[in-house]
Amino acid sequence: MKKTVKKTSKKKIRSLADHPMYTHADFAYFCEKGFSNEEIFAVWDRDLAAGREPCRYIIDPVTIMVAHAAVMVNGLRENLSPEAISSIAAHIQGARTNNLKVDQEVVWFCKKLIGLVGGHEQQARLMEELGL
């Protein structure tokens, strides 16, 4: 039986979600393992050229949440300066609502932001530099 090999399109794929090999589960797996977008594209391009099918496996919601957080953190790191991240963290730190779950999510996000700038000491230094 002859195996048909799929050819990659000459058209540039603009986003990971548009890639023929994209599945949410596979994307979450790569993000959890720390792959960059370029590395994910390379693996999927290689697999597509080899005629492989997209990975279809069941993934738990926590892994998906971790992958989404990794994408968010990478996006912040690539698009915002440490000063901007520090300023955002300073402004949301201590914010309270009448919803405990929302408050917990804001604290989680603030911790992520502080981690992005290098921890609490670096956050304090940046806040002082920014006059916050």
Image (cartoon, helix red, strand yellow):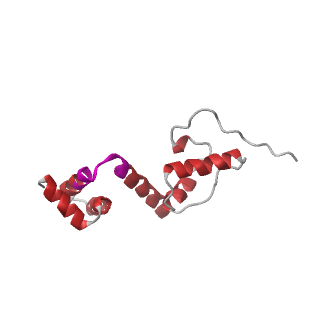
Magenta-highlighted residues: 76-86
> Is 79 part of what is drawn in magenta?
yes
Q: Position of residue 10 (x, y in %)?
A: 63, 33
Q: Position of residue 44 (x, y in %)?
A: 61, 49
The count of marks equals 0
Q: Is residue 100 left or right of residue 26?
A: left
- Taking 12 as reference, is 21 above or below it? below
Q: Position of residue 81 (x, y in %)?
A: 28, 49
Residue shown at the point (55%, 51%) measured from the top left:
40
Residue shown at the point (27%, 66%) measured from the top left:
119
Q: Is residue 70 left or right of residue 10?
A: left
Residue shown at the point (55%, 61%) measured from the top left:
59
Question: Can I make out residue 1 in this image?
Answer: yes
> Is 80 part of what is drawn in magenta?
yes
The quadrant the C terminus occupies is bottom left
Q: Quadrant of residue 124?
A: bottom left
Question: Can I make out residue 94 in this image?
Answer: no
Q: Position of residue 100 (x, y in %)?
A: 26, 63
> Residue at the right extreme?
1
> Residue at the left extreme?
131
- Taking 17 as reference, is 77 above or below it? below
Identify which residue, 3 or 97, lies in the foreground. Answer: 3
> Residue at the top extreme?
11
- Give the main secondary structure of the magenta stretch: helix
